Image (cartoon, rainbow, N blue to C red):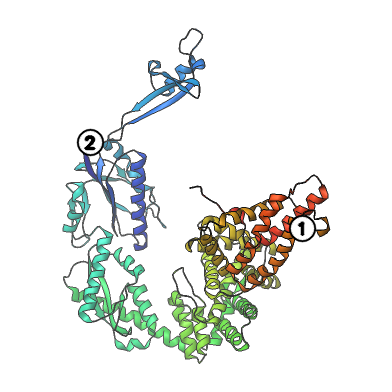
Amino acid sequence: MSNRTFLLEIGLEEMPARFVTDAMNQLEKKMEEWLTENRLAFEQILPFSTPRRLAVMVEGLSEKQEDQSAEAKGPSKKIALDAEGNWSKAAQGFARGQQVAVDDLYFKELKGEEYVFVNKFTEGKSTLQLLSEVDQLLTSISFPKNMRWGSGKLRYVRPIKWLIGLFGDEIIDFTIAGVQSSNVTTGHRFLGQSTVVEHASDYRETLLKEHVICDPKERKDAIKKQIEQLAETEGWQVPVDEDLLEEVTNLVEYPTVLHGTFDEKFLHVPDDVLITSMREHQRYFPVLNDKDELLPFFITVRNGDHRHLENVQKGNEKVLRARLADSEFFYKEDLKTNIDDAAKRLENVVYHEELGSIGDKVRRIKDLSRRLGNKLNVNEQDVKTIERAAQLSKFDLVTHMVGEFPELEGRMGQEYAEKAGETKEVAEAIREHYLPRHAKDQFPTRLESAVLSVADKLDTVVTSFGIGQIPTGSQDPHGLRRQTAAIIAILLDRKWEIELPELFDEALSLCEQRGLLKRNAEDVKADLMEFAELRIKNVLQEKQVRYDMIEAVLSSGITRVDVLVEKGQFLTEQAKKEEFKPLVEAFSRVTNISKKAEFASVKKELFKQPEEEELYNKLHAVRGEVASAKQQGDVEKEFTALAQLEPAIHEYFDNIMVMTEDAELKQNRLSQMKETSDVILSFADFQSVVFHSE
């Protein structure tokens, strides 16, 4: 069967850069699903995108659907034939439903009884016929924001300018929003023109002649290579931010890298401010020397060729000069502000209508930080540092600079605090209490910073849950998943001897004192624990802990996060050993039968056999070791202590009938099982462990 290349392209007015990559990926996925659903064989799908187009090229696409042959089962023979041996109405109805003649029916034995069957053959449709539906793939792409234009009803990211559907050199006929498909595409807005794509496989070459690099990977690689060549020529270091590179790639169709300069007088402004201004306002890459010091140069990417670059350079320098002048003005004005006065102004900034001002939040953070510091036995001097840092933690939110660049919150707080004479510890805590902002971000480096960070995030999460604002589905406007994950990450990094439920209790207690809870505290905590458990599961999965071991350790309750992770990894390793299985079987028998116990009060005087006495004595000897190991957070020692119970448990079940007819004796034995189970379950629920047969 012959194959051809299929091309589908939609041309648009310039899309927002942040929409482009996701839309391209959606189109690729939708095309793959559509081809599979329609039984169309193909070799590969190549996605393309620029600010003005989305496209997919399907190479090696079959000329027609695969033929389909399927056997369908009908009624039994006794129902399919009447008394005279003719086809019954049931058989005739089955034939009609399968769109075959009754002569095509045959009998086949299945599990000792004969049934009517038919072999139904469906010839595949031609690909050309099916491709007339592909407009649905384009209109089904979802965007964060859509618009309407003209008198049409279609809502789409931007007005549609042209459409291409080509199967080889044949045009696929369809219309979207009044635009008719053809084989004509449009080149670069200034350097190219409309041009005919003679054959689907000529797409990339045709566009390149019109100054469009339609493959985003090629554009990105071209930008990186040009930046590297320029940096090498000039002896510069150019840190290439991947997010910025992705955005710039989606802003241009034919990239040309150039550089410019700015006045050295601006270098007295903090580097972060200058870099942020260049990146956020102008999409420029900063330039550093070999000592990582900012130089008065920038690199930008032009959507065009090398002609008249000096004019482009001058234009960019002029715009940047104004931007940096604004940043310098904001910086100088902010330095005139007393930081304590700025902190007082937070009383007039609403945090949440049900939770008060940011000033109220700061007080909660300060109280929570103090409580957390006390739990961690932080010395008095560090507590004072934490309280001062908490008091100033949000003051920079009312500064000009953070008002212009919100992403500089904390960083400017540190800068202004240092200039105001605050200690290095306080200034760093102001910046670091926002860390980590995301999964790959750095952690707070100082104890004071870590305490403040946990307190801030804990307040955000608990107060949100307290007023019923719990994330659902993809909706998480306050970033509570991220904040909870950050708390867990810090606890794991710091290995503090504090359990997550304790933190929730402290925050809930403060909320109750301030009358902030709109729901019962116990219900709020239950929701918080369930929410946190999902985040901990994610951490355990990232740590390569087996899924059944995750269930096993979490079933024993959420305690210290670092211990849970260590426990999960430890059990995952233990599962590789032969002796682990009989131990799990012993523990599981105990925990399983203990569920029938009404209480755990064991009466030694009712023991009838030595195995009861042996298990009782062993348990009471082991219990202290388990408790001591748990207190130290020593997982291996705790497990080793528990493992001492295994021989006594096996002996017990080999010689004792728990569910005896003697009611009093049965209850005492069940109580012994419950007592033993409680100690085992304090480590993990071994019934969750799964053994796969070889």
* Quadrant in the picture for residue 95: top left
Q: Is residue 617 left or right of residue 130?
A: right
Circle 2 — which element? loop
Residue 404 position in % (x across, y down): 43, 76
Which residue, given by chain and number where applicable, does mark 2 sit on? 1
Which residue, given by chain and number where applicable, does mark 1 sit on? 600
Q: Residue at 39% of width from left, 80% of height from top?
A: 272
Circle 1 — which element? loop
Residue 488 position in % (x across, y down): 55, 69
Q: Residue at 41% of width from left, 18% of height from top?
A: 106
Residue 131 position in % (x across, y down): 29, 40
**How would you rate the neighbour count of disc 1 (Cα within 10 Å): few for under 14, some for 14-19, many for 20 or more?**
some
Looking at the rendered structure, the kind of residue marked 2 is: Met
Of all residues shown, which one is farthest toward the top? 84
> What's the CA distance linking mark 1 and mark 2?
75 Å
Q: Residue at 31% of width from left, 74% of height from top?
A: 284
Q: Residue at 16% of width from left, 58% of height from top?
A: 209
Q: Earlier in the sequence, mark 1 or mark 2?
A: 2
Mark identifier at residue 499: none
Looking at the rendered structure, the kind of residue marked 1 is: Ala
Which circle, 1 or 2, is nearer the viewer? 1
* Quadrant in the picture for residue 168: top left
Residue 336 position in % (x across, y down): 47, 90
Relative depth, front residue between 203 and 541? 541
**How would you rate the neighbour count of disc 2 (Cα within 10 Å): few for under 14, some for 14-19, many for 20 or more?**
few
Q: Is residue 168 left or right of residue 510?
A: left
